[in-house]
């Protein structure tokens, strides 16, 4: 009897691909792409990161790279995502004063100080993501989470105010391009930025 011929979607000698195998392949490609992107950024800087460069580094087709991440901006945001998850865990469930069980003004101060560190620690990568897609910051899940967190705390500090608008204004100084201008062009230190954020919070806490 003749051996059965492989059908569409089969691979000779290995049997048909399952949904689980396809998911594993996709996860593997995602990991390889992110690892390659991180190497390129570390070795050559964010400006060297292109979809073609990642495809060349990994041997994965450039079409697959685009399908996984869409564009360079989304790839940059994906690189930032793991650090962002740790930051969110710290201010949502971590120990006080950044986490719960501290007074709202103390939590706001701790949050803004931690955000200043967060932006300066990965400034080049964040700046590249902002440059690639300037408005993407405000539609991202990371910004929405931070804005909601700050809005809740501002509501507790100044219940009569427009908490949502005040939250945007408190977050505005930490746009990567402004942090770059202040620190690298203007010579300001992170401690000076934190001290200025404290002055903003004093104004927020002061009775009208």
Image: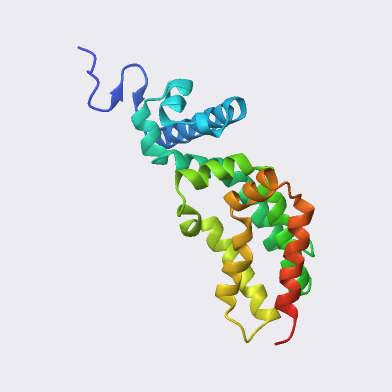
Pick out the residue farthest to the front.
Answer: 186
101 or 98: nearer the eye?
A: 98
x then y, percent, for residue 19: 38, 38
Count up the numbered dots.
0
x then y, percent, for residue 13: 35, 16
x then y, percent, for residue 18: 37, 34
- According to the image, what is the colour scheme of the structure? rainbow
Question: Dividing the image into 4 quarters, which one contains the N terminus?
Answer: top left
Vertically, is 139 above or below 39?
A: below
| Visible residue check, residue 99 | no
Q: Is residue 87 left or right of residue 165?
A: right
Question: Dividing the image into 4 quarters, which one contains the C terminus?
Answer: bottom right
| Visible residue check, residue 142 | yes
Q: Is residue 85 left or right of residue 6?
A: right
Vertically, is 12 above or below 206?
A: above
What residue is rendered at 68% in x and 80% in y? 156
Vertically, is 128 above or below 9?
A: below
x then y, percent, for residue 188: 74, 50
Q: Is residue 150 left or right of residue 191?
A: left
What residue is rendered at 55% in x and 27% in y? 40
What residue is rendered at 73% in x and 71% in y? 201
Pick out the residue farthest to the left.
Answer: 1
Pick out the residue farthest to the top.
Answer: 1
């Amino acid at each position: 009897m003749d051996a059965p011929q492989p059908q569409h979607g089969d691979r000779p000698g290995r049997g048909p691909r399952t949904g689980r195998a396809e998911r594993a392949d996709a996860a593997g490609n995602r990991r390889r792409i992110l690892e390659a992107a991180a190497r390129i950024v570390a070795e050559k800087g964010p400006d060297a990161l292109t979809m073609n460069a990642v495809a060349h580094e990994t041997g994965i087709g450039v079409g697959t790279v685009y399908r996984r991440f869409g564009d360079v901006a989304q790839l940059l945001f994906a690189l930032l995502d793991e650090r962002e998850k740790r930051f969110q865990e710290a201010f949502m469930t971590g120990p006080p004063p950044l986490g719960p069980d501290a007074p709202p003004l103390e939590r706001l101060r701790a949050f803004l100080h931690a955000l200043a560190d967060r932006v300066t620690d990965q400034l080049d990568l964040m700046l590249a993501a902002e440059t690639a897609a300037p408005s993407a910051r405000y539609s991202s899940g990371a910004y929405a989470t931070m804005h909601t967190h700050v809005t809740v705390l501002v509501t507790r500090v100044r219940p009569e105010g427009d908490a949502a608008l005040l939250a945007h204004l408190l977050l505005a100084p930490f746009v990567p391009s402004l942090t770059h201008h202040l620190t690298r062009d203007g010579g300001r230190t992170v401690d000076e930025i934190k001290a200025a954020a404290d002055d903003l919070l004093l104004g927020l806490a002061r009775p009208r």
